[in-house]
Image (tube, rainbow, N blue to C red):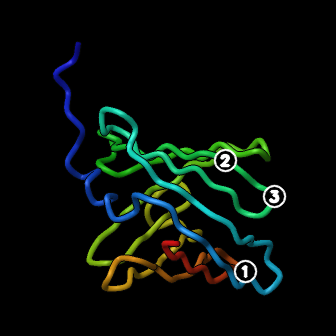
Amino acid sequence: MSDKTPNPALRQLDVLVGTWNVTTSDGGQGASDGQVTFEWMEGGFFLIQRFELGQVRGVEYIGHDEETGTLRSHVFSTTGDVLPYTWQVQNGTLTIWYDAPGSPAYFEGTFAEDGRSYAGAWHWPGGGYKATATRP
């Protein structure tokens, strides 16, 4: 047995735990409404996101990357994609970069004061869409 403990930086993701209904305003860019659920894996080393967004379903594992000091994830979806992301929750703002911080493809959203919703937008060169998540 290991005496390893989860990195405390993971706790910034606590605000996401639970189920969220997602609505999008995509302007024809392919975004889909649906639902996402976040839960801690036993042991607390990974936050698991399960999602159903339109016809796409998948799972994402978010953990602390000791090498980069960031919260890194991998998405596995029914489209066959495996996608890397970096997560950060700081001062009421959720930022998710495709691959690494500073990427031109990213989501940035702000949590409501009561923590029951967040709103923001995905951005990438030449496109993007707005998204809102609310707790049912």
**Residue highlighted by disc 1:** 126
**Residue highlighted by disc 2:** 58
Looking at the rendered image, the disc whose residue lies closer to the viewer, 3 or 1, is: 3
Which of the labelled discs sits on residue 78, or is there none? none
Few, some or many residues within 10 Å of mark 1 (<14, 14–19, 20+): few
- Of all residues, the one furthest to the top in this rendering is 1
Q: Which of the 4 quarters of the picture holds residue 122?
A: bottom right
Q: Which of the 4 quarters of the picture holds residue 16?
A: bottom left
| Residue beneath the point at 74% across and 72% down | 31
Locate residue 2 relative to residue 48 in the image: left or right: left
Few, some or many residues within 10 Å of mark 2 (<14, 14–19, 20+): some
Q: Earlier in the sequence, mark 3 or mark 1?
A: 3
| Residue beneath the point at 64% across and 74% down | 124
**Mark 2: which amino acid?**
Gly
**Residue highlighted by disc 3:** 55
**Mark 1: which amino acid?**
Gly
